[in-house]
Image: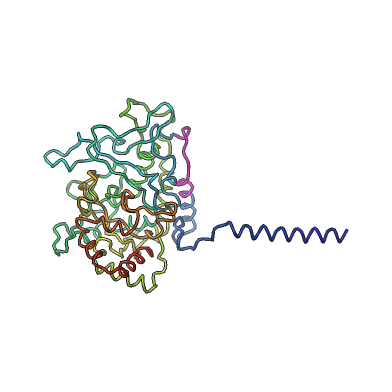
Amino acid sequence: MKRTTLLQFCIGIFLSSIAFVGCEAILPDVPEPETLLGEPMPDLLPQQLQNHIKGDEEFGRVFGVLDGLGPVFISNSCESCHLGDGKGHPSTDIILFNRRDNLVEGEPDSVFNPMVSVNASHLQTRAILGYTAEVLPSDIKGFSRINPPAVTGLGFLEEVTDADILAMADPEDANGDGVSGVPNYVHPPDFFVPKSSHIPDQAGRYIGRFTKKAASIDLLQQTASAYLFDMGITSDFFMEDLFNELNGNHTGDDVPDPEVPASVVRNTVFYLRTLKAPERRGADRPEVLAGEKLFLQAGCGTCHVPTLKTGLSDVEALSNKEFHPYTDLLLHDMGPELDDNFTEGSARTSEWRTAPLWGIGLAEDSQGGRAFFLHDGRAKSLEEAIDLHGGEGARSRDKYNELSAAEKQNLIKFLKSL
């Protein structure tokens, strides 16, 4: 009996060893902490961490018809566009468009405003039963394919003061460097509550800093808009369902509005505010340091400003903190190469907000092993993205092209370390 038990024990140990070795062979390596995006920032208070977790759950929530999804929509969850909180894949692109009947009176045809109707500027490519998904209308004047951005570190960007943003602006290119960044002034939604750091213009507009053209002033506006425009989910901030007017449907779904309360949206906002900033990797390697020097010498840091600072915040972990996003949050004319004939707020069709570069080296991880850069993912490499910089970016692009092959490699290695 004892011999049988011992034999069984030995066989069990042997089989367990085989199983363990087999798992080792097929399981992926544990990722390094600095490569993870969807984590809370350090130094959050216990209650703040609990609120972050609540928001995380809302960010991953999948909506169905019984929850109020639609009637027309783009996606059924936040996370499906921002998988792992990282940069979206072209398969999750959002199409924004302007219509010809919305041209600004007295201005050239290349300049026009977004649709007044709240749903018309987002192409709703999916619909619940009984409704028809949208297609681009025949009278379209311009449209833009937008690749969803990574959502990490947004709380820091939100806390940069308007005064600091305006200090980086140079609308008349007074210093003659060929760069004339300007803020995008947008009309605030009814629920917007300005902070002491917000500075309106004479028309009552405020500086936008989120979306590819800086059309959203803060994360509440951006998130509430995403619930409605991307998922068709109404809230206390936007109370009416999206109507599929282009196809003759004029009624909402059968779920009472608002479909989620303000608390749900605010939880998601807090989650986004308190996601950690992307971390550097290999920043002290000699080739990376050499590439950083070349990046600054080429003038790339004029728009992609390496270091910013937050103002006072109700979240201590965000208050008066220095951080490194590589952006000035301003609009820059990128020339005909990137003119998509689409605009938001006061942005011209060839103007884009300087994209933050932090986390750009992790883009491949969140895009299925192959990276897609620029607002529409058209660039399949960082080299191609640089080459498409025209307008105010042309001088830096030309300086990059003058570098030796080894120097170019070092600059790219620096970018991949961000």
Magenta segment boundaries in residue numbering: 55-67
User: Residue farthest to the front?
Assistant: 405
Instruction: Relative to 350, say whether 170 is above or below.
Output: below
Question: The C terminus appears in which quarter of the rendering?
Answer: bottom left
Q: Quadrant of residue 260?
A: top left
Q: Is residue 315 left or right of residue 199?
A: right
* Main SS, magenta residues: helix
Please name the residue shown 36% across and 72% down the image. Answer: 287
User: Residue farthest to the left?
Assistant: 106
Q: Is residue 344 magenta?
A: no
User: Residue farthest to the right?
Assistant: 1
Say how many tags the image has: 0
Q: Is residue 79 left or right of residue 18?
A: left
Please name the residue shown 19% across and 41% down the image. Answer: 112
Question: Residue 15, percent across and down?
Answer: 72, 58
Which sits in the foreground, 155 or 329? Answer: 329
Instruction: Relative to 404, say whether 254 is above or below.
Output: above
Instruction: Relative to 263, say whether 364 is above or below.
Output: below
Please name the residue shown 37% across and 40% down the image. Answer: 230
Question: The N terminus appears in which quarter of the rendering?
Answer: bottom right
Which sits in the foreground, 71 or 204? Answer: 71
Q: Is residue 58 magenta?
A: yes
Q: Quadrant of residue 126?
A: top left
Question: Residue 210, percent across and down?
Answer: 31, 51
Question: Residue 116, percent across and down?
Answer: 25, 36
Question: Residue 2, percent across and down?
Answer: 87, 61
